[in-house]
Amino acid sequence: MSPLPEELRSYQWPPSTEDIAKEQGLSASQILRFDGNTPPAPPASARPGTIAKALADVNDYDRGRYFALRSAIAAYHDVSIDQVVLGAGSDELIVVCARAFAPNGTVATVPTNSYSMYSFAAGMANATMIDKPKKADLVFVCRPNNPTGELPDVPSVNGQLVIDEAYAEYAQENMVHLINEGAIVLRTFSKAFGLAGARVGYALCDPERAKILSSRLAPLSVSSLSAVLALAALSSPPDVTEQIAERERFAKELTNVGLEPLKSYTNFLYVPYDEPEKFVASLLPFGVVVRAFKGAIRISVRDRDDDDVLLDAIKKMRVGELPDPSLYRLQRATAETRINIRLRLRGEGRVFVDTGNGLYDHMLQQLAFHSGMDLRLEGVGDLETGDHHTVEDMMRAFGDALSAALGDRRGIVRYGEARVPMDEALAHAVIDLSGRPVSQLVISPDPGMAKHALESLAQSARLTLHVEAKGDNDHHVAEAAFKAVGRALEIALRVDGNQVRSTKGLL
């Protein structure tokens, strides 16, 4: 038997969310990852309905090599389709570039402190890493750069130039025009497009180099399901304006807590720090995961709510305060919908609900606000078929999160009652956080889904709910009902010692 080949140095992944949660005594839903440079949520197009046709054909190959996707990418960058090469993430194309242009040769990066995948790819090509780009057979320019976030100049080189633009959307500039001078530009759907798990990347280059890369790729290394997700995402390219604004706000807030992030052109911040490993470890009990580098930490920018959790954790960690276990996270995904929830039972009435269903988004906002919760609920659903699935799953997901946050329901008043007028309408709600899903509801007239929405909440939250709401205007009647439920819930959630309010000792 011939000897086994030598094991190469390989990319090292951080621990899984589940492993971190187990080690810290938390649930996986309480872990916030600031170490992956990905958005906090996938695009609205990433739902089961998008891939339904691809699933129906998953037994077969796409013999056109994803012509529709390659055409859409070409149109997105104003190049021809023969200048587009698909890969299983841009990482696959990084490896292929190393094997094609630097076998047994030399590779350099700009800047030298750059994405570790370049050195792993060099190892796969039996190439040597050097620090002189002018003398290298292959030069990777990470622009914007990972992990530092800077936007380096593109040098003049003698070897093959590859510009990795994984974060170009955040920089709001690109070097695609250099493909006419022989450069290869790499892009990905993993970052701004929010499809990291789909593993779709692509190279833009002249037709000659496209043929060279394609000849070294496995046929159809991108799955048909991933190709459909990427095509759908391209139909509505990401607007990163809000993410950029949050990046700048987050950087200022980090400065206010004593950190000094560098200027960033990406969706993450690079912070020089003397003891990065210690800093990372100190945040883990709070369910917050950031990444350590030599002499620095790197922090992904998520959204304002998540970023504020990290800021709060830093403040508490520095003064020795314990983590706040009151924030609950939940994701509910079905064939029709995807709902993400962040819930704090006793908050400040900070509420944001967005599923694309304006009426019932508004109704749940009223309920959560009047209950005194902090709630952020975002979701997408098959609204083209009607509002039923989206409304039902929104309320079921909210109920699931509420039930999880209540735990054994110890120390709460348990019962609540409220009357709320809304112009000519009047609603009366009585609630018992009993653990028993019962609902007796009269909503007349009903705008369509109000009764069913509250029934869904009672079932998934395991509560007893009585509501009577009547009036002339169906909107007013429903709004009064949801407000009344919220007001009653606020009373029932009040802290009253440490007992379970039941003679049985449990609910």
Image (cartoon, rainbow, N blue to C red):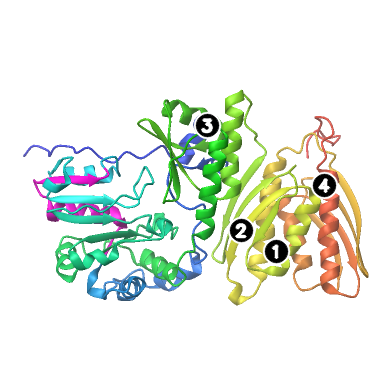
Assign a secondary structure to mark 3: helix
Tell me residue 5's x, y (percent). Answer: 12, 39
Residue 284 falls left or right of residue 475: left
Please tell me the numbered disc located at residue 361: 1
Q: Which residue is label 2 attached to?
A: 378
At horizontal 87% and vertical 60% (from top left) the residue drawn is: 467
Q: CA distance from mark 3 to mark 1?
A: 34 Å
Instruction: Tell me the kind of residue under disc 3.
Output: Leu
**Mark with earlier residue (2, 3):** 3
Mark in the foreground, 2 or 3: 3
Position of residue 344 in the picture relative to residue 92 (left or right): right
Where are the magenta residues, as a range?
86-111
Viewer-nearest residue: 495 or 190? 190
Q: Please check the rendered image and state whether residue 87 is part of the magenta-colored stretch, yes or no.
A: yes
Which tag, 4 or 3, sits closer to the chain's start? 3
Q: Earlier in the sequence, mark 3 or mark 1?
A: 3
User: What distance separates the C-alpha of mark 4 from that of mark 2?
Assistant: 22 Å
Q: In this view of the protein, can residue 189 be seen by the observer?
A: yes
Mark 4 vs mark 3: give the one in front: 3
The mark found on residue 283 in the picture is 3
Q: CA distance from mark 4 to mark 1?
A: 19 Å
Query: Within the image, what quadrant is residue 306 found in?
Result: top right
Q: Secondary structure at mark 2?
A: strand
Q: Is residue 413 above or below residue 233?
A: above
Label 3 neighbour load within 10 Å: few <14, some 14-19, many 20+: some
Q: Are marks 2 and 3 in contact (CB under 8 Å)?
A: no
x then y, percent, for residue 36: 42, 45
The three-letter amino acid code for the residue at tag 2 is: Glu
Q: Amino acid at mark 4?
A: Glu
Work out how far the residue at label 1 is from the one at label 2, CA to CA, in angstroms.
10 Å
